[in-house]
């Protein structure tokens, strides 16, 4: 067996986990919430198309010589708690290869971390200890950025706490890593709850794409070329449609950011949810090109980056830096609230630990 390692976001990717939605057949199972045949069709379409896009992403990664893995659903239904299992869309949130360690914060009623299951006979350094704070909350790894000798921990979000910071500091500072902490004041988001990987992305040394509100990025990465994208630029037929649809989505979520991961919680199967789902699949999906998902990309290496949609101005900027953009459509990224970085976990990358700052 080999050891997994990843010291940056941009060194050559060799092994990658791609998320997995439920099989659409789950909708017909006795334990699935009772919904109408029309609503079943809506849910099935989302699940089938999500899996189709993930398989296309796998093919693209394989074409670069990257070995891909998928999480294992050991059980779709937890008899002991009478509940659907959590859907395994976003491996990034709960798993990370940070330097020479593979760490996780996966908490559920699964007997084993389903993301680890296909890796156990491949990698020798999977750490089974779940890294939690005293409240049982795990670290969110979408808000940690690797840059060789430097580790950037984003503590502005709802997920990472001072205890999480201490866990990372205790694990890595003694090894000579420099830990940096970014706060809300560093990002200056306005009424936004987001992870670092939807705020900025390091594509190669000296090159960053970032939200236009990320004014502190230029100060932190002095001398680097930062392409700023307007975070709130979204392409729709008209502004009124956008505002109406966003209000439907907000109502369907009931104030919960990741409601659409909560298939296992029947309280979310409401009229508002299906109003959202119907509007999403019929009116809005083709136009959902949110800027944060331009930033939420997957870097294969310093010459190749995968995005979920076209962006002419961004791609012109990449050409200047000899970076080739590749598009792998993720049609339901707005539904799942995640981009290509969210739905993947770069298990291992070539290269060692270097100093970039």
Image (cartoon, grey):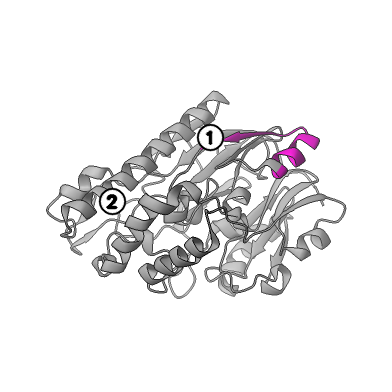
Q: Is mark 2 on a helix, strand or loop?
A: helix
Residue at image coords 76%, 60%:
217
Residue at image coords 47%, 40%:
17
* Disc assigned to residue 15: 1
* Disc assigned to residue 43: 2
Local packing at callout 1 (Cα closer than 10 Å; few below 14, some 14-19, many 20+) is many
Question: Is any part of residue 6 visible from this angle?
Answer: yes
Q: How far apart are marks 2 and 1 (CA)?
A: 31 Å
Q: What element carries label 1?
A: strand
288 on left or right of 273: right
Q: In terms of depth relative to the viewer, which is nearer, 77 or 63?
A: 63
Local packing at callout 2 (Cα closer than 10 Å; few below 14, some 14-19, many 20+) is some
- Image height check: is 15 above or below 237? above
Q: In terms of depth relative to the viewer, which is nearer, 249 or 305?
A: 249
Give coordinates of residue 249: x percent, y percent: 41, 65
Give coordinates of residue 204: x percent, y percent: 74, 41
Task: Check if residue 327 falls in the magenta segment.
Answer: yes
Q: Give the residues drawn in magenta, as a range.
A: 313-328
213 on left or right of 5: right
Residue at image coords 29%, 53%:
111
Give coordinates of residue 93: x percent, y percent: 49, 56
């Amino acid at each position: 067996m080999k050891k997994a390692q990843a010291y940056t976001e941009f060194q050559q990717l060799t092994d990658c986990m791609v998320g997995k939605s439920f099989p659409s057949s789950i909708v017909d199972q006795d334990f699935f919430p009772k919904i109408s045949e029309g609503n079943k069709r809506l849910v099935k379409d989302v699940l089938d198309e999500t899996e189709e896009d993930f398989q296309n992403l796998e093919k693209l990664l394989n074409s670069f010589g990257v070995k891909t893995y998928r999480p294992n659903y050991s059980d779709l239904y937890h008899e002991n708690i009478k509940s659907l299992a959590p859907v395994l869309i976003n491996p990034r949130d709960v798993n990370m290869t940070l330097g020479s360690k593979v760490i996780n914060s996966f908490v559920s009623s699964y007997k084993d971390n389903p993301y680890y299951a296909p890796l156990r006979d491949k990698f020798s350094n999977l750490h089974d200890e779940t890294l939690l704070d005293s409240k049982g909350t795990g670290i969110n790894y979408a808000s940690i950025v690797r840059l060789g000798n430097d580790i950037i921990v984003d503590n502005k979000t709802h997920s990472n706490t001072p205890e999480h910071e201490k866990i990372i500091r205790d694990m890595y500072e003694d090894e000579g890593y420099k830990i940096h902490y970014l706060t809300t004041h560093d990002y200056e988001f306005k009424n936004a709850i987001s992870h670092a990987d939807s705020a900025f992305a390091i594509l190669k040394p000296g090159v960053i794409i970032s939200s236009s509100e990320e004014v502190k990025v230029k100060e932190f990465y002095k001398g680097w070329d930062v392409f700023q994208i307007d975070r709130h630029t979204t392409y729709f037929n008209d502004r009124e449609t956008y505002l109406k649809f966003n209000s439907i989505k907000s109502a369907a979520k009931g104030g919960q950011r990741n409601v659409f991961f909560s298939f296992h919680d029947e309280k979310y199967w409401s009229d508002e949810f299906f109003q959202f789902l119907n509007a999403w699949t019929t009116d809005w999906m083709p136009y959902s090109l949110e800027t944060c998902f331009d930033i939420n990309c997957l870097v294969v290496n310093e010459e190749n980056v995968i995005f979920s949609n076209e962006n002419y101005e961004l791609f012109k900027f990449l050409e200047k830096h000899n970076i080739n953009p590749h598009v792998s459509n993720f049609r339901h990224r707005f539904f799942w609230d995640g981009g290509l970085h969210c739905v993947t976990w770069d298990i291992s990358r070539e290269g060692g630990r270097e100093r970039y700052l």
